[in-house]
Amino acid sequence: MTSIKAPRATKAVRTVRGSRARVLPPSFHEDRHASIAEAAYFKAEHRGFAAGHELEDWLAAEEEVDQRLMGEGRAS
């Protein structure tokens, strides 16, 4: 049986659709995810944790966090 390994990012830059983009470290993605989770929690808290809006909260939080990171020059 042959095992398939996921490719590893070993270079500082990687070509993406003909352009050069930074390869971000795993810690960036972990921090981003934690920031999104926290923002989504506060959105849910603000509306009294009413069920049925979890995805909406997550997507709105994701947009806010990504906009903030782009403003800081940290998102690619």
Image (spheres, grey):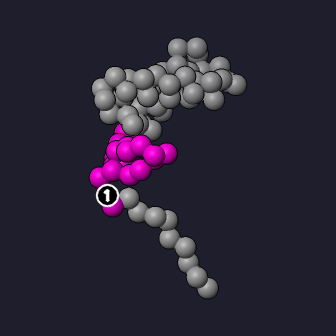
Q: Residue at x 48, y 33 (%)?
A: 37
Residue 41 visible to an observer of this rendering = no
Spot occupied by residue 46 in the image (x, y as percentages of width and height): 52, 14
Q: Amino acid at mark 1?
A: Lys
Figure check: 1 above or below 68: below
Task: Say left or right for 71 vs 3.
Answer: left
Figure check: 9 above or below 63: below
Task: Say left or right for 9 vs 42.
Answer: left
The residue labelled by disc 1 is 11
Q: Which residues are magenta?
A: 10-31
Please tell me in which quadrant of the rendered image residue 68 appears: top left
Q: Residue furthest right?
A: 52
Q: Residue furthest top?
A: 47
Q: Residue at x 56, y 29 (%)?
A: 58
Spot occupied by residue 18 in the image (x, y as percentages of width and height): 45, 46
Figure check: 11 above or below 18: below
Q: Residue furthest bottom?
A: 1
Residue 46 visible to an observer of this rendering = yes
Query: Element under label 1?
Result: loop
**Does residue 28 show up magenta in the picture?**
yes
Spot occupied by residue 4 in the image (x, y as percentages of width and height): 55, 73
**Residue nearest the viewer, comparing 22 with 69:** 22
Task: Say left or right for 28 vs 55.
Answer: left
Q: Residue at x 60, y 21 (%)?
A: 49
Figure check: 5 above or below 76: below
Count residues near mark 1 (Cα–Cα under 10 Å), then give few for <14, some for 14-19, many for 20+.
few
Q: Quadrant for the N terminus, please.
A: bottom right
**Does residue 9 show up magenta in the picture?**
no
